[in-house]
């Protein structure tokens, strides 16, 4: 599904390498988690995959279902099935949440040569998915993320994901700032989307999330590289002992 090889990335503005050879393969149907100390490059990886400006790939490759991601515009990446739930969701003043969702869904369908979703079907779908995430009707009418609480923004990201039905979902600390009930809702939302033809990359600091979204594989990222890969028990080890032992082991 997602194949990243020897990915090296630096900031465009300055000669600061951030990713220093990331190798990562997420298979269809699998949930991979990435943990790692602050500043290790987890968000940078997700930004580079989604096509955000400001980063320069100096070496390596990233493919989504065989297609070269790095050669595509952000919109093309989305149409190809990539979705990123941001660590810091952006507010979009003046654009209603529902309008935004419908435009995004239909733009992607069009790019894939599919028919647009008609208004009635869209409304039915969005209401059902919003209900599952306990996002009320009023929040669907407000401008995207404007005035939403931290936890409401995170749930709204999952609503977008559910509506877009991407093939590869990257969640960057979607659990941060969520109360325990909201975390359960978000995890249920993610689990409902787990399927044999969809992959997930879940970036998190907390093992707690992984109790709900049980990962197939856990990676530890440090200083721009994946330094250790294991099963769900690796997250438990981090929770109990922190990163010191792992970092010393690979140093
Ligand atoms: N635009 C930028 N300007 C300067 N430094 C940057 C920029 N973008 C990223 N960095 C640096 O790159 C490194 C990796 O940042 P990144 O946000 O990817 O870390 P992270 O693993 O997501 O951390 P966290 O767990 O705190 O979210 C950090 O040292 C950060 O300061
Ligand atoms: Mg981050």
Image (cartoon, rainbow, N blue to C red):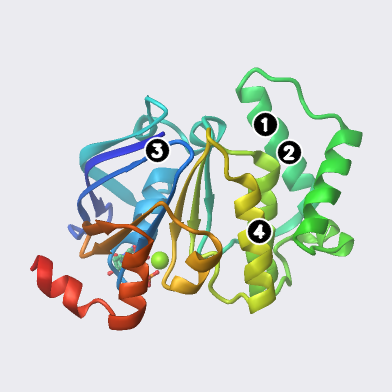
How far, Cα to Cα, is label 2 from label 1?
A: 6 Å
Task: Decide which of tag 3 and tag 2 comes sooner along the chain.
Answer: 3
How far, Cα to Cα, is label 1 from label 4?
A: 27 Å
Q: Quadrant of ligand 2?
A: bottom left
Disc 4 crowd rating (10 Å Cα; few below 14, some 14-19, many 20+) is some
Q: Residue furthest bottom?
A: 241
Q: Give above or below for 142 relative to 52.
A: below
Q: Is residue 38 visible?
A: no
* Residue 245 in picture, x, y percent from top left: 17, 77
Contact? badges 2 and 1 (CB < 8 Å): yes
Classify residue 25 as left or right of residue 75: left
Quadrant location of the N terminus? Answer: top left
Task: Decide which of tag 4 and tag 2 comes sooner along the chain.
Answer: 2
How far, Cα to Cα, is label 1 from label 3?
A: 26 Å
Residue matched to label 4 = 188
Contact? badges 4 and 2 (CB < 8 Å): no
Disc 1 crowd rating (10 Å Cα; few below 14, some 14-19, many 20+) is some
Q: Nearer the viewer, residue 229 or 142?
A: 229
Q: Give above or below for 58 relative to 229.
A: above
For ligand 2, tell me if the residue under mark 1 lies within 8 Å. Answer: no
Task: Decide which of tag 1 and tag 3 comes sooner along the chain.
Answer: 3
Q: SS for tag 4?
A: helix
Q: Residue at x 83, y 57 (%)?
A: 131
Dot label at residue 103 = 2
Residue matched to label 1 = 107
Q: SS for tag 2?
A: helix
């Amino acid at each position: 599904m997602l194949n990243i090889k020897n990915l090296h990335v630096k900031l465009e503005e300055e000669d600061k390498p951030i990713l220093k050879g990331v190798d990562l393969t997420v298979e269809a149907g699998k949930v991979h988690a990435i943990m790692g100390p602050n500043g290790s490059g987890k968000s940078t990886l997700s930004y580079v995959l989604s096509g955000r400006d400001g980063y320069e790939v100096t070496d390596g490759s990233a493919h989504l279902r065989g297609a070269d991601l790095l050669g595509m515009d952000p919109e093309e990446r989305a149409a190809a099935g990539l979705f990123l739930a941001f660590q810091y969701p952006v507010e979009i003043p003046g654009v209603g949440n529902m309008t935004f969702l419908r435009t995004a869904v239909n733009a992607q369908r069009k790019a894939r040569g599919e028919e647009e979703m008609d208004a009635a079907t869209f409304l039915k779908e969005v209401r059902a998915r919003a209900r599952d995430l306990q996002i009320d009707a009023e929040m669907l009418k407000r401008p995207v993320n404007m005035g939403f609480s931290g936890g409401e923004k995170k749930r709204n990201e999952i609503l977008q994901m559910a509506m877009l039905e991407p093939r590869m979902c990257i969640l960057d600390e979607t659990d941060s700032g969520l109360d325990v009930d909201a975390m359960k809702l978000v995890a249920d939302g993610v689990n409902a989307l787990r399927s044999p033809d969809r992959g997930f990359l879940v970036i998190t600091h907390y093992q707690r999330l992984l109790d709900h979204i049980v990962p197939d594989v856990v990676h530890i990222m440090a200083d721009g590289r994946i330094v250790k890969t294991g099963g769900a028990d690796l997250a438990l080890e981090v929770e109990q002992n922190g990163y010191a032992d792992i970092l010393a082991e690979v140093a």
